Image (cartoon, helix red, strand yellow):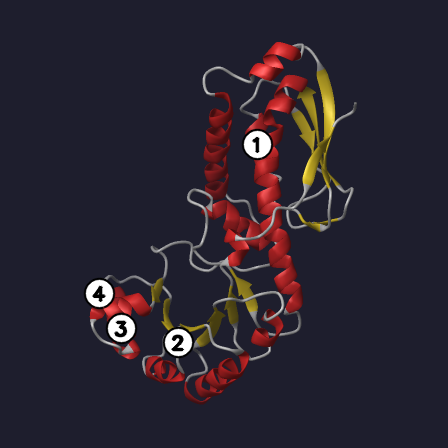
Amino acid sequence: MRPVFDAETKAAAKTLARMSLQEDLRDIGDLTCLATIPADLQATVNIVSRQTGVISGLPVLPLVFEELPGPVTWTMPLHDGDPVQRGSVLASVSGPVRSLLTGERTVLNFMTHLSGIASRTAEFVERIHGTRAVILDTRKTLPGYRLLQKYAVRCGGGTNHRMGLYDGVLIKDNHLAARGESSCAAAVADAREFMAQRAAHATIEIEVDSLSQLRDALNERPEIILLDNMPPEMLREAVSIRDARCHETQLEASGGVTLETVRAIAESGVERISIGSLTHSSPSLDLGFDWPW
């Protein structure tokens, strides 16, 4: 199933595309192109992958070139979420050379970043193949880019965690400390009562960093318990405790997950593995414009 580039994500991308071009052009324009490139010069360029990975960000390409003098046309033989090899042609773009040169870096900034996230996510997904766990992102995203970065995670086969603070309850250690009490169960109960008073529904999740906290939290049967920085052997024990107490509560492992450790974490029996580095540390995928000269 292909990832959906929905209306909300498109609107966010359009805003970012305009902002990016404004950073480059201000009210003056591309001085180099205006000074050196004839206004009527036309060309077709290919956007090509320089390495193996998973593509994401193709729908942003039209949003950039629609902001520049045209007509600019494009064809896209691939779709977001498709695997690419070195030399794969992702898109062909035709139009005024001035516009192609002006938009080149903006398009590549989006596509290399998003494709890097998709590619790294796909690596994690492949490492846990055959287990019941899913790979999730976090809120560790660039301001303004959250919808796009989480879209890229989906392109790589990952699953989105909550989109923001507005659509899910996640009680962490600082919430417990600020309350002046250590009871995980009491915090979950308060969150559930608050949601009931509002006649609203949101997933209630709580973070624990010890098995004693896990046992306490299970007394209130939250939908999800996040197991923070637990080694695989402790995760396996946590799964056994959960299985004996409350099958419907899902367990999520988080904290310092790497490509080298994710398989052992998944094999512990947890249902969810959240990885902040997907959106804050994935290396860009090397893409480029191949010009006809």
Report the disc number at residue 209.
Answer: 2
Residue 61 seen in render: no
Q: Which mark is residue 106?
A: 1
User: Does the residue at mark 2 contact the one at mark 4 (Cβ under 8 Å)?
Assistant: no
> Measured along the vertical axis of the image, is residue 152 above or below residue 66?
below
First of labels 2, 1 by sequence position: 1
Residue 97, image x and y in percent?
67, 19
- Image depth: mark 3 or mark 2 in front: 2
In this view, the mark in front (1 or 4):
1
The numbered disc on residue 197 is 4
Q: Residue visible at 62% across and 65% down?
A: 259
Quadrant, the C terminus: top right
Q: Is residue 217 toward the left or the right of residue 180 in the image?
A: right
The percent coordinates of residue 38 (x first, y second) are 67, 10
Is the residue marked by circle 4 packed among few (<14), some (14-19), or many (20+) residues within 10 Å? Answer: few
| Depth order, front residue of 285/223 | 285
User: Which amino acid is tagged 1?
Assistant: Thr
| Image marks 3 and 1: residues in contact by CB distance under 8 Å | no
Characterize the local packing of mark 2: few (<14), some (14-19) or many (20 or more) Cα atoms within 10 angstroms: some
Foreground label between 2 and 4: 2
